[in-house]
Image (tube, helix red, strand yellow):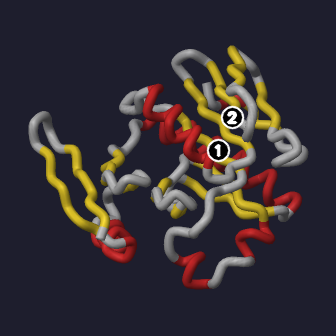
Amino acid sequence: METSTIYLPPRLELKINLTQEQFWQLCQENDDLRFERTATGELIIMPPTGGNTSERNADLNYQLKAWSRQNNLGKVFDSNGGFTLPNGAERSPDASWVKLERWDSLTLEEQDKFAPLCPDFVVELMSPSDTLPKTREKMLEYIANGALLGWLINRKKREVEVYRPQQEMEILVNYETVSGENVLPGFVLDLETIW
């Protein structure tokens, strides 16, 4: 049984043991909250975003979904979609995409719960409550667990950090668009609506 940690106000820490099924139930019974869990079992309660971040995240998902509908190469997920990564972490990127053949290889039960795979493409859109070091750790975790492309969008700095397997992270400053490269052929995100 894994030990999970809930971080509460300073000096309060609650450690609980959760199986994967118990974590799933916790999420279902508290559907007004968002949870993630690290590979070491730390339970993270994700605060809701403010209006600006939420609106921009909706636009990001809209653009990705519109592209996906045109080519039907995969499935798009918003920040409510949970994935169990190969390292055991349960994560919910702000936007993600999975190749259709990988999604279709899952059973219906696997598709209904936290899909046991890492998305091929992930995006984290930083909100005021996010820290850059922790968000960068998540991006590196996605890449280490099989993501082929990842974007960390930092609106305050107008930067996109691009993550790829076995390559150094690249920072794009003040770009108007960013390309999905060969992972998302033909997809170009309009950043003007995100900034």
- Residue 195 x %, y %: 61, 24
Q: Amino acid at mark 2?
A: Tyr
- Residue 95 x %, y %: 61, 49
Residue depicted at 39% across the width and 36% down the height: 50
Q: Is residue 171 above or below residue 183?
A: above
Q: Is residue 65 above or below residue 22?
A: above
Q: Is residue 167 above or below residue 101?
A: above
Q: Residues within 10 Å of mark 1 (few under 14, many from 20)?
A: many
Q: Amino acid at mark 1?
A: Ile
Residue depicted at 56% across the width and 25% down the height: 154
Question: Relative to the observer, which residue lies in front, 41 or 62?
Answer: 41
Q: Would residue 192 be visible to someone looking at this image?
A: no
The numbered disc on residue 143 is 1
The numbered disc on residue 161 is none
Q: Would residue 91 be visible to someone looking at this image?
A: yes
Q: Residues within 10 Å of mark 2 (few under 14, many from 20)?
A: many
Q: CA distance from mark 1 to mark 2?
A: 7 Å
User: Do the numbered discs 1 and 2 sit on residues whose CB atoms are within 8 Å?
Assistant: yes
- Residue 66 x %, y %: 77, 53
Question: Relative to the observer, which residue lies in front, 147 or 194?
Answer: 147
Q: Which residue is mark 2?
A: 163
Label 2 element class? strand
Q: Quadrant of residue 78?
A: bottom right
Query: Does residue 190 appear left or right of residue 135 in this picture?
Result: right
Q: Quadrant of residue 105?
A: bottom right
For the N terminus, give its image quadrant. Answer: bottom left
Residue depicted at 41% across the width and 51% down the height: 38
Residue depicted at 74% across the width and 37% down the height: 166
Q: Quadrant of residue 71?
A: bottom right
